[in-house]
Each structure stands twice: as C-alpha cells, then as structure tokens.
Image (cartoon, coloured by chain):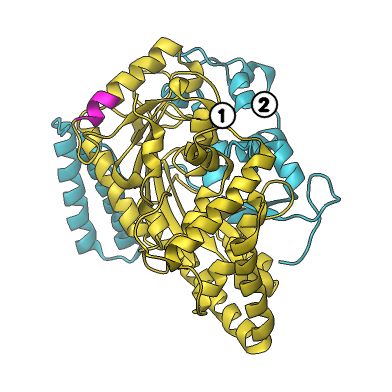
C-alpha cells in the first residue's frame, strides 16, 4: 500500500491559491453521491457486499481518466494518524474513516478529485478547486460521473433521481460548497446577519474550524441543501449568486474597517505575524486565529506579509496529524505545540530566504 | 435576523440556522452549537444533514404502529428502523416506503420530482417524459387562452411523442 506521506511533498491543489478570489474563497467543492443498484446501501450491506462494491468501483475507476493510476487506500489498512491526516486535508470525511468496515478512498492527481467508496453511500465523487469556481468543480465531477456511468449501474429512479442512503441527498445527490474567509464581516460584527441571509434562501452555513461554541479563524462553509426538484445548474447558480453577494458584503466591510480603524487593524495583523514568527510553542487553535489575521492582511494588500499559498499551507499543515506525519513520529500535545511553532517559523523563513521548495 | 435563543434548550444564543423549504413556506430551526452537536448535525461527530430529517421525523405527527412495521421487500429494513437511524437500506426502499417518504421529501427539499441529470441509459426515457410534461402544460395554457389552432398543433405533437414512447423507444 502506497504511503500517505507521499501526499506531503508539494503543496497541492487549492492550497496554491491560484483560483479566482482565492483570498476570500479558499476552495470550491462539489460532490456527487451515487449508489450501485446491485448492492444494498451501506447500513444493510454485509461486509462481503461492501468488498464487492469496492471491487466494482475500483475496476471501473481504472478505466477512467484521470483516475487511471490514482492510488487506492483501503481504510481498514490505514492507521489512526493516516485517517486523521486525510480528514485534515479535506480529502476524507470523518464518516469514511470512523470504523473498520470495508471502505476506500481514491485520490486523484493533485488531490483535485477524490472518490470515497462506502462512506454514507457507495460512491462519493468529490472535486475541489482553488478559489471561487463552481462551474469548474461541477465540470470535473460531472465528467467523472458520466465516465463511470458507462461501467457501473447507478441506483436511479425517474421520479426521485439518484437514490441515496439518506433522503436528504436524493435527486441530484449533489452538495456544492464554498469555503470562505470573512474576517471583515466578523470584525464589524455583521457576520450573523449576512450568513442568516444565506440560510433564508435555503443554503446551509457552518463554521469550518473550531470545536465547541466558537468559530475559529473566520472560515465558513456555505453549501446548498436541496437536491430534489432542482436542476444541478440552477442550484449552482443560486449558490453562486449568494456567494457573490457575500463577497460584496465582505469587501464593503473591509473598506469600512480600513477607513475607520486602519491602525488597529494593521496592528492586529502584524502582531499576529509577529507571534507566528516568534512563538516557541503554539496550539493549533491559536494558529488558526493568527493565520486568519495574517490572511486578512494579505487580502488588504499590506506589505511584507507571507504569500497566500504559504498562509494556506500553514493553515493546513499545522493540524495535529499533519504535524506528526511531518515529524514522522507520534507526539503528545505539548511536543506537538513546540514542533508546530518550529514548523511555522521554518515555513515563514523559507519564503524570505532562497525560496524554492520546502516540505508541506 | 437578530439574536434569538436556541429553539431546543431555550437558553444559549442560536448560532446555527437551518432552513427547510416546504412549497412556498420556510421552516426554520435555530439552535445553539451545543444542542446542534448533541443532536448530531454539527461538530466533529456530525453526520451532516441527516439530523434535519431526524428532527422532522420526530416533530412531525407520529405514524401508526402498522406503518412502522412496513418492511422493504428487498433488504428487509423496517420503516421504524429507518426513522431511528435515518438511512435507507437499498434502492427498493424508496418504493416500499413511497407513501411515508413523500412528506419527508417535500419537507426537506420542497420538491418531489427529480429535475437534474440522469444516467445515460435513462436519458431517452427521462427526456421524453419531460417533453410530455412540457407539452401538456403548453396545451393547457393554449386552451386557457383560447388559442385553439395552437392547441391542436400541440395536441398532435403530444400524440406523436406518446406513440413513439409506446412503440418501445427505450434508448
């Protein structure tokens, strides 16, 4: 089995901030849920049947570009660290890696396309792209869906569309989402109003990082909720409209903050950079809020800040499983926090220095 | 939308706002993070949207005992089991529990008829079905507007499509 640490090498995909509006929109994601007609859904399938599903899907996948040579990881063979790593990297969901039933994940080139096998449904096709590009992400997964459709028989009814284990996904089986960074709205205390506007038109909003009662780092995921009764394109259009609107509000909030409180904002940002540069021990949660502040600075065009790709890399690689994979050993929280601080200092220094590649 | 308390515990501020669209009415659920996590639709142990169905299954009128004992012909899942875990067992479940699922689908999605893409093998049938629907609407509209010539044209077209369907176009 291929080692997951191969994924650590170069910064991948959305981390490179190459997409449109990548400062506000970290990534755009579209996933399609499908089941094979010939097998019971996950909760009623025996393990042998789930194995059968993996066989069918992986042999179909091998006939389809761009997944022809993509590595397939079987979840039962992955240790706890590797599983957390996949979740941190946004490649797998917790449901996929939560137990030891026959499940698998196929990771396409550049981590842009991922197939989860036997998560909540037999197959989940996921496309992630940088920035705000719903049409792109849709095109990628739609193509793979069409290609796989040639080799697999999906459970489908004319009336209800693609049949999914959970009725909340039936129909298009599509969940489209954008991961947004809204520090200005948060700082100017307008975030609640803006996000509830999104929920009022049927979208779901959740804080992306943070456990417990608070959103950390001002990152939110906005996604559609409806999958039955609406064409995919229309759903994407409404999500696009709302996301654009939110972008406008964020931009306005930014201007207002700069006009009224420039010095305070800059102070917050550069202090955050200072902390990241100089800390000797730092916990993941603090990294998230400091990184969010620095990211804000980059968006505002402030000088002498790290690049957006570097900030993204700090964001993702300072998570617990990533740190341990980088260190190639398990570490308890105290050790991890020290390693994290070193890791971030190294990353920040690498940009000021000769440039070139450094470990993710 | 201003601050409001969580609709489940009534104490903490609601920070998570969920919306269900039922026809033209909007059902909203406003909860705090803690209750959302406890109910399982937010946070690390979250199962995502499944719990919205859960909530509505619990809040909606309870179904009779006999209805709960309906089992799927293919996988054997009991409807009562579905209500408990929120997951169906196989594609046949959508047929076996057709009646019980319809109100749930309407509540969750607002719609009950698929409007999106279909697998290649179903493409022809689905396309024809949608054309029939569209023609029927056009026909009714033409008749309402007393555009009888147009109506006659549409009716002929409709006949053509229905006949080709019967003739076994299953492409």
Indicate whether residue A61 is drawn in magenta.
Answer: yes
Q: Label 1 vs label 2: CA separation?
A: 9 Å
- Judging by colour alone, the chain drawn in cyan in this rendered image is B
Q: Which residues are magenta?
A: A58-62
Q: Are marks 1 and 2 in contact (CB under 8 Å)?
A: yes
Q: Residues within 10 Å of mark 2 (few under 14, many from 20)?
A: few
The residue depicted at 66 percent of the width and 54 percent of the height is A280
Q: Find residue A240 and report its horizontal and vertical position in percent.
A: 43, 64
* Chain identity of mark 2: B
Nearer to me, A200 or A42: A42
On residue B63, the disc is 2
Quarter the N terminus of chain A occupies: top left
The residue depicted at 38 percent of the width and 41 percent of the height is A7
Q: Main secondary structure of the magenta part?
A: helix
Quarter-of-image position of residue A357: bottom left
**Of helix, strand and loop, which one carries label 1?**
helix
On residue B100, the disc is 1
The residue depicted at 15 percent of the width and 30 percent of the height is B168
Nearer to me, A96 or A18: A18
Quarter-of-image position of residue B81: top right
> Which color is chain A depicted in?
yellow
Specify whether residue B134 is in view: yes
- Please say if A38 is above or below A313: above
């Amino acid at each position: 089995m291929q080692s997951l640490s191969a994924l650590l090498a170069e910064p991948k995909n959305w981390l490179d901030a190459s997409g449109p509006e990548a400062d506000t929109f970290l990534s755009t994601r579209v996933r399609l849920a499908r089941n094979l007609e010939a097998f019971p859904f996950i909760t009623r399938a025996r393990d042998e049947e789930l194995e059968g599903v993996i066989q069918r899907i992986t042999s179909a996948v091998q006939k389809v570009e761009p997944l022809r040579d993509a590595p397939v990881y079987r979840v039962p063979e992955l240790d706890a660290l590797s599983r957390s790593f996949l979740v941190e990297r946004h490649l797998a969901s917790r449901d996929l890696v939560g137990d030891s039933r026959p499940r698998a994940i196929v990771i396409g080139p550049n981590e842009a396309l991922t197939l989860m096998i036997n998560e909540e449904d037999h197959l989940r096709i996921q496309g992630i792209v940088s920035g705000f590009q719903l049409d792109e992400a849709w095109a990628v997964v739609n193509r793979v869906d069409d290609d796989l459709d040639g080799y697999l028989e999906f459970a489908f009814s004319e009336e209800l569309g693609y049949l999914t284990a959970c009725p909340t996904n039936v129909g298009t089986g599509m969940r489209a989402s954008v991961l947004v960074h809204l520090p200005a709205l948060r700082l100017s205390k307008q975030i609640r109003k803006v996000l509830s506007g999104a929920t009022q038109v049927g979208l779901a909003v959740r804080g992306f990082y943070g456990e417990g009662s608070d959103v950390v780092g001002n990152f939110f995921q906005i996604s559609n909720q409806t999958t039955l009764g609406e064409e995919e394109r229309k759903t994407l259009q409404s999500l696009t409209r709302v996301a654009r609107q939110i972008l406008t509000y964020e931009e306005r909030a930014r201007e207002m903050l700069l006009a009224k409180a420039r010095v305070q904002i800059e102070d917050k940002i550069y202090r955050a950079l200072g902390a990241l540069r100089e800390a000797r021990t730092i916990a993941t949660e603090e990294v998230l809020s400091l990184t969010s502040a620095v990211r804000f600075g980059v968006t505002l065009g402030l000088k002498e800040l790290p690049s957006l790709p570097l900030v993204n890399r700090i964001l993702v690689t300072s998570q617990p499983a990533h740190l341990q994979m980088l260190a190639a050993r398990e570490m308890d929280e105290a050790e991890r926090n020290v390693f994290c601080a070193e890791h971030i200092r190294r990353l920040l220094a690498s940009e000021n220095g000769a440039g070139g590649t450094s470990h993710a | 939308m201003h601050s409001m308390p969580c609709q489940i515990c009534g104490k903490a501020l609601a920070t998570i706002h969920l919306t269900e669209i039922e026809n033209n009415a909007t059902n909203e659920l406003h909860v705090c993070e803690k209750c959302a996590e406890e109910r399982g639709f937010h946070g690390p142990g979250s199962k995502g949207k499944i719990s919205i169905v859960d909530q509505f299954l619990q809040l909606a009128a309870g179904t009779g005992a006999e209805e709960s004992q309906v089992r799927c012909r293919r996988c054997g899942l009991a409807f009562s089991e579905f209500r408990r875990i929120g997951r169906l067992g196989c594609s046949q479940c959508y047929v076996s529990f057709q009646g019980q699922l319809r109100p749930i689908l309407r509540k969750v999605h607002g719609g009950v008829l698929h409007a999106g893409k279909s697998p290649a093998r179903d493409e022809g049938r689905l396309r024809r079905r949608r054309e029939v629907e569209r023609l029927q609407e056009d026909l009714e509209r033409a008749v309402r507007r007393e555009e009888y010539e147009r109506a006659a044209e549409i009716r002929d077209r409709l006949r053509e499509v229905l006949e080709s369907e019967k003739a076994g176009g299953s492409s």
